[in-house]
Amino acid sequence: MILAALSDYYERLLDDPESGISAPGYSQEKISFAIVLAEDGSPVEINDLRDFSGKKPVPRTLSVPQGEKRTVAIKSNFLWDKTSYVLGVSASSKRSEDEHGAFKTLHHQVLDGSDDAGIKAFLTFLDTWTPQQFTTIPHIAAHAEAMMDVNLVFRLDGERRFLHERPAIREIWSALQTQVEDASASGMCLVTGRTGPVSRLHPAIKGVNGAQSSGASIVSFNLDAFSSYGKQQGENAPISERATFAYTTALNHLLRRDVGNRQRLQIGDTTVVFWAQADSAAHAEEAESALSAFFGSEDTSEQATARLQAILEQVRQGRPLRDLPGNLDDGTRIFVLGLAPNASRLSIRFWETQTLGVFTERLAKHHADLELDPPAWRRPPTPQFLALQTAPVYGDNGRPKAEDVPPSLAGELTRAILVGTRYPRSVLGAIVMRFRADGHISPLRVALCKAVLAREVRLGKQHGMPFNEGEPPVSLDPHNQDPGYLLGRLFSTLENLQRAALGTQVNATIRDRYYGAASATPASIFPVLLRNAQNHLGKIRKDKRGLAVNIEKEIGQIVDLLEAIFPRSLPIEAQGRFAIGYYHQTQARFARNGGKDATDIDTEPEGEEA
């Protein structure tokens, strides 16, 4: 299904003249220079084709005759290649002489006998060129350092088109492709269902982080152990030449590394590409913009983010997306593919296809699971930023680092969001460990902790599983009797009491010293904390009697909801609820006091007991 979807996407791109997709038999390659030839075959100029708009020049992407798939064998490309093949010079290859010989042999075999002026000039250049000329011809030597080991093409002097774009050469190349197809074994294509020439080797997929720089394969049978029933290599999974070219070209187009590509992004070790299929190009483009904002592509604008928030709000209200201004359509088909490197091949980390309406409904549920009051973010967090919350934070002002996130976790989290399934359980364990290790109980960490627990309960109940606990509350719930939640609230109140008694100059609060033990083994810590609380209350009563009464009353209300004996230990889910209760109680106190800590305020006692 993946290959069929990519093949269909290629056919749609081929109908769009602005897509830049290559026609059958051609591929998009990075080209740095063009050698300009006179009619007598002499090189008269070097054209620098690189893009200089960025910090450093980068090769230009051109449509050229499809390149050979190289492993260790010497195989020449047609009318373009790197300098070791084209000119016989290289800073890295030790067999540039043999590679240049293969380049000359191929083109003489294919092009000899043609009357085309461009072909004659090119063949004369091959016959007269020597590697020593690379440094002796002035206009070539001037670019020698930049030209070394990059891809080159040719152009005839006085023409704007490249040599491989001349009609005579296109006709020759087309005939070569037909010969290759005729020589291939015939079979029924697994993608199209039609009988035709089967591709023996599939072109490499480039652009997946961590894979080989020369490219990797999704479909590959390159060892004798994979041969069976007399079938070798691509015959084991028969895919036609046309479908093979279509799916690899479309995927390489999606994976291209350029500033304008918003359909590719990196999430952990997973390289993600996405595209849309709709009745009109405008609907597809609008849907891709919304997905780009969700995934957090580098070029995502504030306007795109605001658009995503409007879409999510529309879904929460149960209204169709087509009612929004613009070109959104609930029926637009969305495709999301996650790829990860696996030796010389690529593994499919996840694959999901649904309508835009279904995807946005799942995204809305995801944000509902994350919801906290007060909100934990100013703009919807991307999957990679959520995964970053599981990384350690060093120091008070430290920032988590992407390399500290488990490689597969971000991809698994993204898949859970897209498919609407449970979040990875490793997320909860990682966050709870971070709470205990570095003490950073940040809003987004708490929101992700709450989301894992909320989705676990919600999906479990949908499947008829019994749950004693309900979904964690969005804001402080004084009637919630979950032990973990109550203990978190109690711990926050005791910390507030300590701050009120000792002031803000205390070196380490009970959170700094006891949070890990209190959340994991309450029975060993809370009796000690409550005994110390009496000392703190006695000290506060001397100066702030009202504050002491209110805090004591708050402690009593929470303890009354707890069982008579503190739990000896809390499971990982209860430790997550402990963090949520702690966060809710702390935030409610700040909201009640106008954003100030209670230690700054001497309040009158509340209620009749005062």
Image: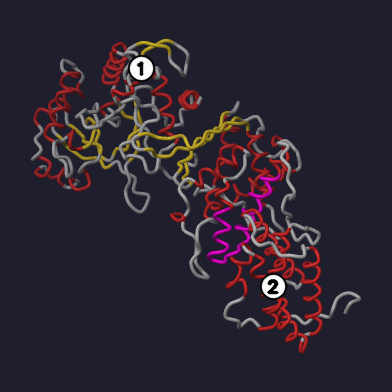
For the residue pair 573 and 264, the one nearer the viewer reads as: 573
Identify the residue shown where x is 34% and y is 13%.
Answer: 229
Residue 563 in percent (x, y) is at 77, 62
Q: Position of residue 347 (x, y in %)?
A: 43, 35
Q: How is the image coloured?
A: secondary structure
**What's the CA distance linking mark 2 and mark 1?**
72 Å
Given residues 70 and 455, the one toward you in this image is 455
Q: Which residue is mark 2?
A: 527
Q: Quadrant of residue 506?
A: bottom right
In the displayed structure image, the side of residue 145 where residue 211 appears, left or right: right
Q: Main secondary structure of the magenta part?
A: helix
Q: Is residue 160 above or below residue 11?
A: below
Upstream in the sequence, badge 2 or badge 1?
A: 1
437 within the magenta span: yes
The span shown in magenta is 429-457
Residue at the outermost bottom position: 542
| Magenta-colored stretch includes residue 246 | no
Does 516 sit left or right of 493 as displayed? Answer: left
Mark 1 is surrounded, within 10 Å at the Cα level, by few (under 14), some (14 to 19) or many (20 or more) other residues, namely many
Residue sitting nearer the eye, 496 or 461: 461
Q: Which residue is mark 1?
A: 235
User: Which image quadrant for residue 346?
Assistant: top left
Q: Look at the image and tell me whether residue 597 can be seen.
A: no
Q: Amino acid at mark 2?
A: Pro
Asked which secondary structure carries label 2, the reply is helix
